[in-house]
Amino acid sequence: MASASSPDVLRAPLVVEFPFTRSLGPVQSAFLTGLRERTVLGVRAVDGRTLVPPVEYDPVTADELRDLVEVAPTGTVTTWAWNHEPRRGQPLGTPFAWVLVRLDGADTALLHALDAPGPDAVRTGMRVRVRWAVERVGAITDIACFEPYEGKEAGPQPEPHTGEFENPVTGIVASARLDYTYSPGRAQSAYLHALAERKTVGERCPACHKVYVPPRGACPTCGLATTERVEVGPRGTVTTYCIVNIKAKNLDIEVPYVYAHIALDGADLALHARIAGIPCDEVRMGLRVEPVWTEGGRHPDHYRPTGEPDADYDTYKELV
């Protein structure tokens, strides 16, 4: 939708989200499995310090670390910051404090949430303890949060631990998500408006005269603003390409398919788009293509061969 303050500049809510899957080595496996069993493990560094959370390699010497120890579920706040407005997926749904907690027996601090009635109830040096989640699966969220604790500091010496548990956690899937409002700015808003009219518009640099598509609002070489709009294409030349064999989530395109960089006629920058209407193994550099629009589409659905002879390499070599 258009901005109320500037109807020519577009704005849209966007979400970038993907699952991050990783396998666990013996140290991280023991740490997360231990949380499932209400046990907090650290690892002994070369210099004798106990690191919590544990790491697999010494941060100073890079030596491999395997000497696991159990530390107490109680500790001391070393620093904190109040979170007035919790966001989706954060440990607590009400305002809370982000705290670094040095657990009893540890020499480093663990970052987590502290459930407190307000910022006046939080201070550096306060004593806290782990509040365990009711259902634990072998993740950092097995620590639901920390809560204030009136007890004294436990003994300074952590106890050795084998790190062995039944049914150890061997891998995790962490969801990464970013919600934000994107505004493409003046130049790209004009580009998108033109696409809605089935035109492709770039902008020319006043110094080097290169035509950038999509436009950037400024020439990256000369550093000058670009305001002169130039219609390019609609036909173009494939400068390079790849064959996609892995189907993307929520993308209704059957694999394999070809994704290519296309230098539109009159442009000095290649854009990327899908190639269809030709077998994947017949797509090649220099192939001449044209856009294919779908009914109501705001951008070309794909590009297809025009039937023209291939472009000479010298005509597009600077755009590869």
Image (cartoon, rainbow, N blue to C red):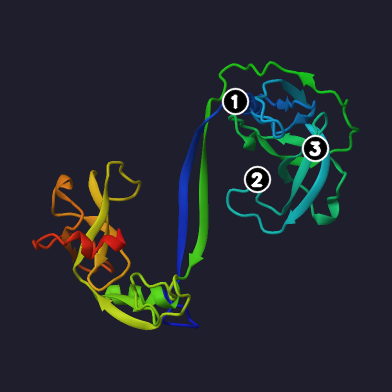
Q: Is residue 293 visible?
A: no
Q: Which is more N-terminal, label 3 or label 2?
A: 2
Q: Is residue 84 visible?
A: yes
- Check the picture and name the quadrant holding the C terminus: bottom left
- The CA distance from mark 2 to mark 3 is 19 Å
> Around disc 3, counting alpha carbons within 10 Å, would you say few (fewer than 14), some (14 to 19), or many (20 or more)?
many
Circle 2 residue: 91
SS at mark 1 in the image = helix
In front of the other: label 1 or label 2? 1
Q: Which is more N-terminal, label 1 or label 3?
A: 1
SS at mark 3 in the image = strand
The answer to whether marks 2 and 3 mark residues whose Cβ atoms lie closer than 8 Å is no
Report which quarter residue 136 is drawn in. Answer: top right
Residue at figure coordinates x 83%, y 31% from the top left: 104
Please state which amino acid type lies under the numbered disc 3.
Answer: Arg
In percent of width and height, residue 257 lies at 23, 48
Please state which amino acid type lies under the numbered disc 2.
Answer: Pro
Circle 1 residue: 29
- The CA distance from mark 1 to mark 2 is 22 Å
SS at mark 2 in the image = loop
In percent of width and height, residue 111 lies at 71, 42
| In-front residue for pair 273/174 | 273
| In-front residue for pair 162/34 | 162
In percent of width and height, residue 162 lies at 68, 15
| In-front residue for pair 78/234 | 234
Q: Which mark is residue 4?
A: none
- Check the picture and name the quadrant holding the N terminus: bottom left
Horizontal arrangement in the rendering, residue 190 relative to residue 302 (left or right): right
Please state which amino acid type lies under the numbered disc 1.
Answer: Ser
Report which quarter residue 256 is drawn in. Answer: top left
Residue at figure coordinates x 81%, y 23% from the top left: 158
Circle 3 residue: 102
